Image (spheres, rainbow, N blue to C red):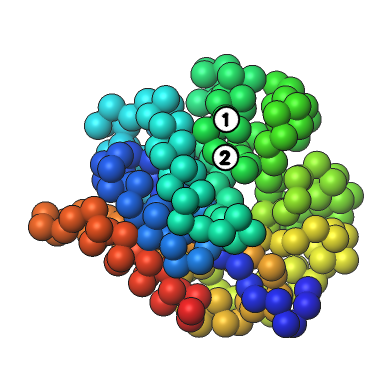
Amino acid sequence: MSKNKQTQLMGHIIAGYPTLELSMYAALGIAHAGVSYLEVQFPFSDPNADGVVIEEACDKSIAQGFKVIQGFSLLQSLSSRLAHTQSKDKQTRLIVMTYANLIFHYGVEKFIKEAKEFGAWGMIVPDLPLESDEKLRILAKKYELNIISLIAPKTKATRIKKIAKASDEIVYIVSRSGTTGAKTHIDSTLLEWLKFIRRLCKKPLALGFGINSNEQVEVLKNKVEIIVAGSYFVRFITELSKESKLTPQDYLHKLQEHTKALMGW
């Protein structure tokens, strides 16, 4: 990648956590800091790619009655507000992140159609098999919704090429085995792995799992186009939720500063 191009950030919130309203303002804070992408996670009861921080947040959102239609309502409100507060060329791209069973239960075409209608740019489904996706990728093309595919550690070269070809616009690189949350060590093994993928994939690379400090970000600049931070944000939102006197605007401002601190903006 070009050394002059600024590394982009993909942020993350859980729809309905700690409440629907506060998840909206947390999202606005992250977006207003200047992130290029924002994952809006629709909570699912068995988020098998996620660590304890995100899993507990999903459980709380579900316990409070989260429904898919509420997620789409949040998406619509967020998309509308960002359209009025960000210039078109710098508008944060909204990505629905969830698990295959939730989509299949809701209805694949219905889910994709509504995701696009309510403002999603793309979708990430970590447990979606490439070979048996219930026509999700075909339907996504029909509605012009980008499906971002993941490349896991130790994936063979032929498989990397196949995943990269199937992924729309960008490719998500999983930095290590296991679940989200635990800190990832940016060592020579990971950097060599990124170089290996780069030789096989010409699309922009997004690296996620365990990115939670500015020190990591600095090492990764010029190595990947996009840094993905999930638990970094959800953990902070959990801490804020323990302070009963905070207003929605407090969430917005605090998440904005938290985002800037990660990226050194």
- Which image quarter is the N terminus in? bottom right
The residue tagged 1 is 117
Question: Which numbered marker is on residue 120?
Answer: 2
Mark 1 element type:
helix
Instruction: Estimate the spatial distance between the alpha carbons at disc 1 and disc 2, rounded to whole Å.
Output: 7 Å
Residue at (35, 64) in percent of width and height: 255
Q: Is residue 213 left or right of residue 226?
A: left
**Of marks 1 and 2, the one in the foreground:** 1
Q: Is residue 245 left or right of residue 120?
A: left
- Within 10 Å of disc 1 (Cα), the crowding (few <14, some 14-19, many 20+) is some
Residue 139 percent across, percent down from the top left: 72, 25
Residue at (33, 29) in percent of width and height: 66
Residue 40 percent across, percent down from the top left: 47, 44
For residue 95, above or below residue 229: above
Choose between 174 and 8: the one closer to the eye: 8
Q: Looking at the rendering, which quadrant does residue 33 occupy?
A: bottom left
Q: Amino acid at mark 2?
A: Ala
Residue at (41, 77) in percent of width and height: 261
> Is disc 1 in contact with disc 2, using a CB cutoff of under 8 Å?
no
Q: Amino acid at mark 1?
A: Glu
Q: Is residue 41 visible?
A: no
Residue 251 percent across, percent down from the top left: 27, 59
Q: Looking at the rendering, which quadrant does residue 199 occupy?
A: bottom right
- Within 10 Å of disc 2 (Cα), the crowding (few <14, some 14-19, many 20+) is many
